[in-house]
Image: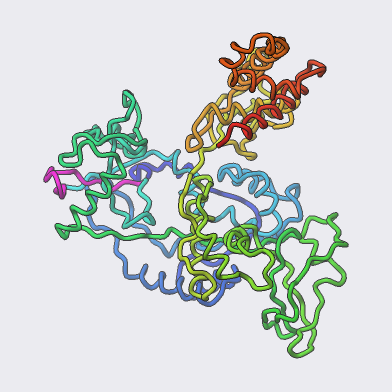
Amino acid sequence: MADYNTAEPYKYGFTTDVEMEQFPPGLNEQVVTAISEKKNEPQWLLDWRLKAYSRWLKMEEPKHWPNITYPKINYQDIIYFSRPKKKYASLDEVPQEILDDFEKLGVPLREREKLAGVAVDAVFDSVSLGTTFADKLEKIGIKLPFNVIHPVTKEKIPVYIANFIIMEYGSGAVFGCPAHDQRDFDFARKYSLNIKQVIKPYENIKLEKAYTGDGKLINSDFLNGLNVKEAKEKISKFLIKKKQAKTKIIYRLKDWSISRQRYWGCPIPIMYLKDGTAVPATDKDLPVTLPEDIDFSKSQNPLKDHPKWKYTKYSKTGEDALRETETFDTFFESSWYFARFCSPNSKDIIEKKEAKYWLPVDQYIGGIEHAILHLLYSRFFTRALHDCGLLNIKEPFHGLLTQGMVCHKTFKDEKGDWASPVDFDEKKNKEKFLIGKSEKMSKSKKNVVDPDLILNKFGADTARLFMLSDSPPEKDLEWTDTGIKGAYKYLNRLWDLVTKNLNILSKKKKKKKNFKKKKKYFFFLSLLNTNFVKLPINAFNKTTFCNNALTKLLKATTP
């Protein structure tokens, strides 16, 4: 990732002069165990870490690299644990050195506040480096002195070791498809590799960047003419038949903390005895309910400070116990609530008969970020409930619609800080801002649009119409001021069309013949007329009552 023939320091590294505790350099079983204890990890996780360490000891570096030289790395000179000694009550107390590292890592402001109180040492976690700067680091490849033979076309294909390949994805060794993967496309451009287009878009598009959508296959022998899904199925069957491949499902399930240090959420039914033993609450102790007389004036978990709630009795023995004061994260409940909805009035967890009738859910709608988190956890929970005999199904959802993101341009002020679109005025202060690329709306990058401003100026219907009409649900929506204004003008034209032609309704009795010919038109106008008569003409009334009328129209005309 860097030119090791130079003495230039690694520019993406993190340095700090903050007083910290750290282990001596080097890695061994004692260090691995100590780090695990610092993280308060369970025994099974420590066992996995020790197993990984044992495997790491047997790994060898490649002896010969064709295009790169670097000094031998002494892994025992590296410090593997380091964190600030002090934990800070608020972000104001955090030293500037750490704040600078937060900025490098791209940690959102909200997360910084959490880290300040419970885990400032996260700044020193080098794992964040690869994910945070993955799109910024230069893509570098090392060509190996041999080729591989394509299993279908028998073409010779060059082999590269590249710094952007994700080892956790599949086997870590992949076929590149430069025309249809942006990272592969950039890599091929840099090393002058052949970019063969194998998917033709349904619309004629010049490939100035990778095309990642659907289309018909070209330059693909017996797969020509198929769409992407059909081609994947056919090539899989072909290679399996020739015993050159096999299909395998790999779940990229990530660790996800089930608890949160706050009041809101479902209480965790665990209590702790005097000797530290954790025991589950008995049926007699359920449900565990949250107290209503809660004080939110302090920054830490308010349940810890409640004078009575956390003190209880273990019903099996009668001895004193402390409740778990953390609550479940919302993902925990949302991973199985749909099963409970099937029988909301049941005293049991799930009515198996009702669940069999209603499940699986017909359509799951969510963002792409859910694919390896909430979606997979829902499947995990469903299979667990199936194994417990509570459900007849193993898959919770019948269909999946991955919705696009709402995107907006990003802005930075003269200091390099993220700025809101509200602060940016193209006519007045354009030169004071650096305009970045359009990205998913994010509170950390401040490229969000305040819905109240839109509602107050244009009305809710304008926002709805723009979002529904500008982009298909599976595509990203580029939020633009011109788009909003266009939707607003359209609604106003609709209003004018109706109000200017209301007089036609009063003449319908005299012209029965024409009325029959224009039955649908009169029906539309009459529905709208019920809401429009004698209303003051202003934006609020226009949008509100137009929405009511159109809603009635939809209900009346829906089969």
Q: Residue furthest bottom?
A: 317
**In the visual, does 371 lie left or right of 150?**
right
* Position of the N terminus by quadrant: top left
The residue drawn where x is 67% and y is 69% is: 346
Question: Residue placed at 62% from the left, 43% from the top?
Answer: 100
Q: Is residue 160 above or below residue 59?
A: above
Prevailing secondary structure class for the magenta stretch in the rendered image: strand
Q: In the picture, residue 498 is in which quadrant?
A: top right
Residue 553: quarter of image: top right
Position of residue 388 relative to residue 8, above or below, is below
Q: Percent from the top left, x then y, of residue 362?
A: 50, 52
Quarter occupied by the C terminus:
top right
Q: Residue furthest left?
A: 154
Q: Which residue appears at 20% of the width and 41% of the height?
A: 223
As rendered, which of 447 and 428 lies closer to the eye? 447
- Residue nearest the observer in this picture, 80 or 390: 390
**In this image, 367 relative to 300: left or right?**
left
Residue placed most toward the observer, 542 or 409: 542
Quadrant position of residue 197: top left
Residue 469 is situated, as x and y percent measured from the top left of the image, at 55, 27
Is 162 magenta? The answer is yes
Q: How many marks?
A: 0
193 over 516 or under it: above or below: below
Instruction: Name above or below for residue 154 compared with residue 199.
Output: below
Residue at the spot 28% in from the left edge and 40% down from the top edge: 177
Position in image of residue 108 (x %, y %) = 63, 44
Magenta-colored stretch includes residue 387: no
Viewer-proximal residue among 345 and 149: 345
Q: Which residues are magenta?
A: 146-163
Q: Can residue 146 be seen by looking at this rendering?
A: no
Q: Position of residue 154 (x, y in %)?
A: 11, 45
